[in-house]
Image: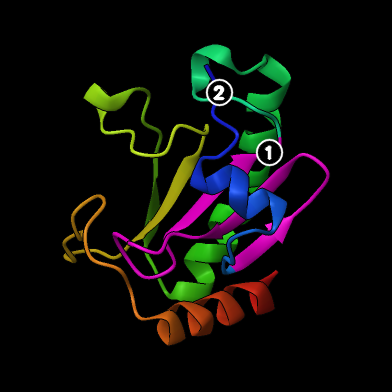
Amino acid sequence: MYDDNNIFAKILKGDIPSHKIYEDDTTYAFLDVMPRSDGHTLVIPKADATGLLDASGQVIANCMATIQMLAPKIVDAMGADGFLIQQFNGEAAGQTVFHLHFHIVPRKLGQSLRPHAGEMADPETLASHAHIIRAAL
């Protein structure tokens, strides 16, 4: 069952601030506060869905269209060599926020990723990265 008090729902309502990268009628993209790499972005639907299994095909398609548009721009903006897409379903799979979300993780050759749900990033660094990525859009 969807909990409309989860942190991403609160971000969508404007109750919690985020470092917004992009928004349209169906999706919202913002920087992960515990990034695995610089520019690590989350794409979430504006629809109530906990994961892939309770989201409609259209909700998933909207998220994928946003990912497809944003990922190469994030890679260029962050000087990365590629990107990783991650999506977790259920606690056993590593999901910590139960609102459907996709991770766009920029990758640089030879650079290790930080742990999933690791340390909080410096807010000024996140603001700078968000500015750089938005400028690339």
Q: Residue 2 has which mark?
A: 2
Which label is found at residue 22?
none
Question: Mark 1 belongs to which amino acid?
Answer: Ala
Q: Position of residue 27 (x, y in %)?
A: 70, 43
Relative image position of residue 113 (x, y in whole percent)? 21, 59
Residue at disc 2, secondary structure: loop
Q: Position of residue 33 (x, y in %)?
A: 40, 64
What residue appears at the point 73 percent right and 21 percent down from the top-left corner? Answer: 58
Helix, strand or loop under label 1: helix
Vertical placement of 19 versus 135: above or below? Answer: above
Give the amino acid at mark 2.
Tyr
Instruction: Find the distance from the CA under tag 2 to the CA under tag 1.
Output: 23 Å
Q: Which residue is mark 1?
A: 65
Res 97 quadrant in image? top left
Please give the name of the residue rendered at 48% of the width and 40% of the height, measured from the top-left corner: 102
Closer to the camera, 19 or 3?
Answer: 3
Q: What range of the chain is rendered magenta?
A: 20-46
- Asked if residue 52 is among those painted magenta in the image, a careful observer would answer no
